[in-house]
Amino acid sequence: MDINEAKNNFRDIISKLNAFNHAAGVIYLDALTAAPSDTAEGRGKTLGILSRYMYDLSTGEPTRETVKYLLENTDKLDERLIRELKEFDRENEYMRSIPAEEYVEFTVLLNEADAVWHKAKEQNNFASFCPYLEKIFDTNRKFANYYKPGEDAYDVLLDRYERGMNKETLDKFFRSLRERIVPLIKKISQAPPIDDSFLHEEYPIYKQREFSDYLMKVMGIDRTHCGIAETEHPFTTNFNRKDVRITTHYHLNDFTRSMYSVIHEGGHATYELNCGEQYDGTAISGGNSMSIHESQSRFYENIVGRSREFIEYIYPEICRIFPDQTAGHSAEDFYRAINKSEPSLIRIYADELTYPLHIMVRYEIEKAVISGQAKVEDLPDLWAEKMKEYLGVTVPDDTRGVLQDSHWSGGSVGYFPSYALGSAYGAQMLQAMKKDIDFTAAVKEGNLAPIVGWLTDKLYRHC
Amino acid sequence: MDINEAKNNFRDIISKLNAFNHAAGVIYLDALTAAPSDTAEGRGKTLGILSRYMYDLSTGEPTRETVKYLLENTDKLDERLIRELKEFDRENEYMRSIPAEEYVEFTVLLNEADAVWHKAKEQNNFASFCPYLEKIFDTNRKFANYYKPGEDAYDVLLDRYERGMNKETLDKFFRSLRERIVPLIKKISQAPPIDDSFLHEEYPIYKQREFSDYLMKVMGIDRTHCGIAETEHPFTTNFNRKDVRITTHYHLNDFTRSMYSVIHEGGHATYELNCGEQYDGTAISGGNSMSIHESQSRFYENIVGRSREFIEYIYPEICRIFPDQTAGHSAEDFYRAINKSEPSLIRIYADELTYPLHIMVRYEIEKAVISGQAKVEDLPDLWAEKMKEYLGVTVPDDTRGVLQDSHWSGGSVGYFPSYALGSAYGAQMLQAMKKDIDFTAAVKEGNLAPIVGWLTDKLYRHC
């Protein structure tokens, strides 16, 4: 093997892996947005076969030899390729530590688990999902041990989403958050209540769809490269820098749920759409740290989307599309209503202040299950207990409790802290941004270009 | 290799090919129903890589040896496997005749061509699509010559969609159709005109969506295994017997366009959903002959869907969803309006009688281009000429002319006659069916189960 041959081999491997990732990604997107309910079986077979190809391609002898050869000859390579090789090798070390059969089995399991979770959530039936959730937690623990034997499994999982993160840091982070948030929530609870009942009138779905298109426009999202679909639990996915998809979920009697889902997911999309062209088709394209990714979604959702200036800018359009529902309510009423802080049941619709407490509940549960201190079968009770303790709310059913999120059924354990970290990162970015540009003026004019420009320069283009 | 090893190898190859077909199929479905407009580039790379895997897997030495070995030992195999091997080998003979690079290039070309066609149709810009269409016709001719050198290329193409079909048979078939249809159309043109203006009022899209769900229900289609999406040019696709998708296109001022697309595509779906379980995951799953497939779509569209009994059954629901638009119009008015026969521009919305003339136009153009008698750049004129000659209509633009269908941009040359043959087959099936069941009574009661049951027994279950 000479250096050019090795470089070509590497490019070829990455292209093939990107193709498999793209294919599997479209299958997941379809599964979550368009596929009929009882189609998981055939999809599982296909995903199993594709994941086996990906595993073999990633971990096989030819790939290992190529990467080894290149890493031994870094003096002949440019910096970007070296970074790519190191990232690829790091990810591969993880994959190689897992036996092929178990890797494929987990893919197939997750496909089934998603279908079971959907029905379990719909029917408030935790028992049907419990065996899947047990396997998912067990597999996460097992894979963490394969990868870093002897290390704390939950620390290993946290590090997969946010490099260098661990329980020690997060415990401190959440402790300091709790110390400030809990008294603030108490204080707010004594203030006169805010009337947000007009947000709960009927907002026809087809009109909400029209409003989503408007929001995407205000966010400056290029629709020729970004689609919007509907799903149970909103998420964003991207196949490459020029093909990004967000999703939302419309609620007839809760207008702002989809509104803030679209802005949140639109933040993820803005990141991906503005990644640097030079990383296209490489192993380091797209956003890497999940917390940084969530910093963007949370930045647009809360810092932009819940600001008085933003609401004042978009409110006339809301009134145009929903004249009856908004009659007699001013932009200020709307602004106050969407910033109402009140302990609630559902994380993704929680206000900015109580939101981190939802994350803490999940963080502590994950910690407890991975360490073996809690059993999966007890999670509904544990969930209710912690929600009572932190937020003071009574969980009426598992649909609005332990079954609400799609992360666990999707196989992710250790992801949730990314949201809280992201919210904090976003606030820090705002401070830095304000030194360079007039954030408030930009939002007031409904022209987010200077904000997107600043973030592209400092963050997005670096992937 | 022993017989069991060979059988296992073969099953493994088929499973992998099914997985690749499934993945590519979902990518196509997404491209045509959900993907943002400017995402073809990344998709092309992925489809190119997947198609190369499929080509190598299908035509590679290990596969050829396995199939050869099994075909030499048919005495040790059951009949179904022998049939599967023969079908697989037949299809592979075709693939093997094409050089790998050209096979992959064609896949990538078609992905691009679809995107270009969409825009060309939207902008009435044949010139932009012309070079792609030239390549598509040229490639079809070239592939036909690779496969059966010395044979007539268009005959070879026709045979790919309907085994044994050729120009000689079709010329006769179309001649006899023309002889009967043309005088009938003339006679009808002298009858008093039918007023169908109420079908062209505004029918809000979100209500048409609701009506589609109703139609699917009446057709007895199991929605847990069959989805419905929206696209430019309606089609049906299936990933396996339990995952079928139809598509439609809603027109605000032309209610029955989507209505009959749903019934047409619903016919395709009914076929696939009722295929025999024993063929799952084999090389002979799903409908095979395209004319037989179209016989089902056309059977439901015309024989069921345009019958007086069907309209009488569904009309109350139409009135419920669209009370304003249907006010003052009876089921009989509706029945007459949807059966109005009048030469028109668009094939898929043509009435039952004039429809075959649209097919003839395409058939003659394909014949002329493949044989070299016509040039692709002249097709807009040729199209207009033939539409004038057969249907007496003036083609106002290419959007409603040569650019209207998606078959050529999708790479299919020789497919169109399947629709006309399918219509004829469907009529013959009706005659046979009526000997066994009371077709009219079933439709009248809105219970298509006996019809689906008969077709399943005689046709669907045999794939």
Image (cartoon, coloured by chain):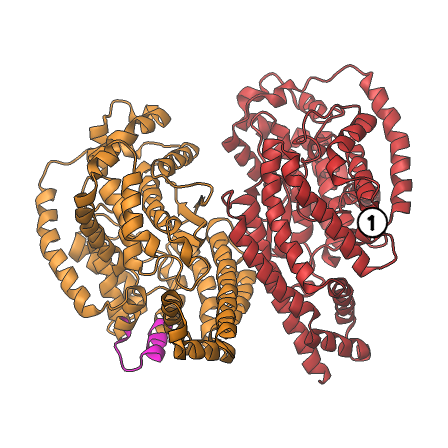
Chain colours: A red, B orange
Q: Foreground: A261 or B145?
A: B145
Image-quadrant location for residue A418: top right
Q: Which quadrant would the N terminus of chain A be assigned to in this image?
A: bottom right
| For residue A41, above or below residue B94 | above
| Residue in the picture at 63% in, 33% down | A125
Whether residue B196 is visible here, answered yes or no, is: no
- Give the x, y percent position of residue A457: 75, 54
Q: Foreground: A412 or A228?
A: A412
Highlighted magenta segment, given as a residue range: B139-154
Furthest toward the bottom, the residue is A2
The residue under label 1 is A154
Horizontal side, residue B363 vs residue B8: left or right: left
Horizontal side, residue A177 vs residue A293: left or right: right
Q: Which quadrant would the C terminus of chain A be assigned to in this image?
A: bottom right
| Residue in the picture at 17% in, 52% down | B392
Examine the structure image and report whether residue B151 is included in the region drawn in magenta.
yes
Kind of residue indicated by mark 1: Tyr
- Give the x, y percent position of residue B147: 35, 77
Q: Secondary structure at mark 1?
A: helix
Horizontal side, residue B330 vs residue A146: left or right: left
